């Protein structure tokens, strides 16, 4: 379950930000995740809740916004919703984006 | 007590990206071609490395990093062929990452080709750049002829797609042409090789690709 690696990287950054801001509790975490990144959101949330236990991020809500990649035929310009390599016209389809994993915003309680 | 909002704009993958970049710079500086060998369990990844080492002995200096939950078995198979190798135990993890590779990469500055055998599965290793130049994805007909269409992302990002054990296709009722077509549709730029390592099918084609990659080193 590679979501554990992602959850660990995420928790490290959250705890760094919490300490920097003297937070008592992390309330909500906003993420932007590319749709082509192989990540299961439920497993990510589960891993995060498990490893954040006993830290200021315990119980924090995670909100995920998914970002679509741009999938366009380089010959006829047709756009696709799903990954494909060749268009019906025979053109090569280019795929850009959809691979990011950004920590956008963190809401926390401070004194 | 009050609530604040911090605009973080932090790339959660930044650590792996930075270490992959460092690995890539080290390899490029020393003229090493690193190949991330990915694929299903039992698809033939280790045997491909072993046979390649034997075929190019005295001609190309090869090194290997063997990643697995317990990497000892693959490591022992490969070092028997007299090459420099390092086992990387991932423990609980189902993939290698740039950090693990970073620990051992400096031992391989004097090789021409560095094979990095990833943990056997078609999902977890996909989004972890190791700093490699090429990605080879290996599957076999015994995994079912729908294995390519079920895992689009790993095949989309491959430079070479190997469909191994084609001599067994009839016995397991797998349609090799369907697998090739599925791979081509997902990734028209990749080199696709039908192979059977134990029957010497497709192996020369693989060696040709590798030699071509070596010739274009530094370009």
Image (cartoon, coloured by chain):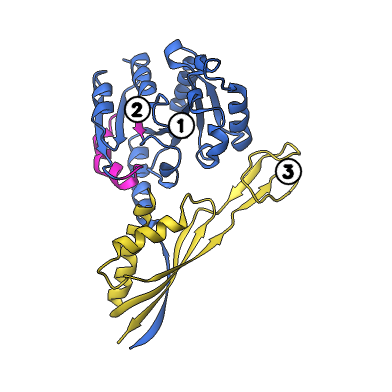
Chain colours: A yellow, B blue
Residue at image mark 2: B112
Position above or below: A80 against B106: below
Q: Please tell me whether mark 3 or mark 1 is closer to you in this view.
A: 1
Q: Nearer the viewer, residue B71 or B81?
A: B71
Asked if disc 2 and disc 1 are in contact, CB closer than 8 Å, the reply is: no
Q: Residue at x 66, y 51 (%)?
A: A81
Q: CA distance from mark 2 to mark 1?
A: 17 Å
Q: Nearer the viewer, residue B22 or B77?
A: B77
Mark 3 residue crowding within 10 angstroms, few (<14) / some (14–19) / many (20+)? few
Subunit that carries the residue with mark 1: B
Verify whether residue B105 appears in magenta: yes
Pointer 2 and pointer 1 on the same chain: yes
Subunit that carries the residue with mark 2: B
Residue B162 left/right relative to A52: right
Residue at image mark 1: B136
Q: Indicate the secondary structure of the residue bearing disc 1.
A: strand
Pointer 2 and pointer 3 on the same chain: no
């Amino acid at each position: 379950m590679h979501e554990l690696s992602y959850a660990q990287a995420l928790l490290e950054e959250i705890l760094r930000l919490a300490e920097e801001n003297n937070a008592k509790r992390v309330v909500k975490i906003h993420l932007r995740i590319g749709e082509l990144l192989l990540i299961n959101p439920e497993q990510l949330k589960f891993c995060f809740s498990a490893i954040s236990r006993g830290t200021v991020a315990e119980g924090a809500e995670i909100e995920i916004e998914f970002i679509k990649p741009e999938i366009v035929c380089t010959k006829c310009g047709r756009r696709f919703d799903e990954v494909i390599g060749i268009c019906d016209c025979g053109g090569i389809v280019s795929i850009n984006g959809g691979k990011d994993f950004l920590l956008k915003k963190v809401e926390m309680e401070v004194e | 007590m009050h609530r604040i909002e911090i605009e973080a704009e932090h790339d959660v993958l930044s650590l792996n990206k930075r270490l992959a970049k460092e690995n890539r710079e080290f390899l490029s500086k020393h003229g090493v071609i690193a190949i991330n060998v990915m694929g299903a369990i039992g698809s033939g990844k280790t045997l491909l490395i072993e046979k390649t080492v034997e075929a190019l002995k005295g001609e190309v200096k090869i090194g290997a990093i063997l990643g697995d939950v317990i990497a000892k078995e693959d490591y022992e198979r490969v070092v028997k062929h007299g090459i420099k190798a390092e086992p990387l135990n991932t423990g609980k993890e189902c993939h290698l990452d740039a950090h693990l590779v970073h620990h051992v990469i400096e031992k391989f500055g004097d090789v021409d080709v560095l094979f990095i055998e990833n943990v056997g599965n078609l999902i977890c290793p996909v989004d972890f750049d190791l700093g490699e130049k090429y990605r080879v994805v290996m599957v076999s007909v015994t995994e079912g002829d729908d294995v390519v269409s079920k895992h689009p992302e790993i095949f989309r990002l491959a430079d070479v797609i190997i469909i191994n054990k084609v001599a067994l296709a009839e016995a397991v009722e797998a349609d090799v042409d369907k697998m090739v077509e599925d791979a081509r549709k997902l990734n028209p730029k990749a080199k696709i090789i039908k192979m059977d390592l134990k029957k010497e099918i497709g192996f020369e084609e693989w060696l040709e690709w590798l030699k071509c990659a070596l010739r274009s080193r530094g370009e």
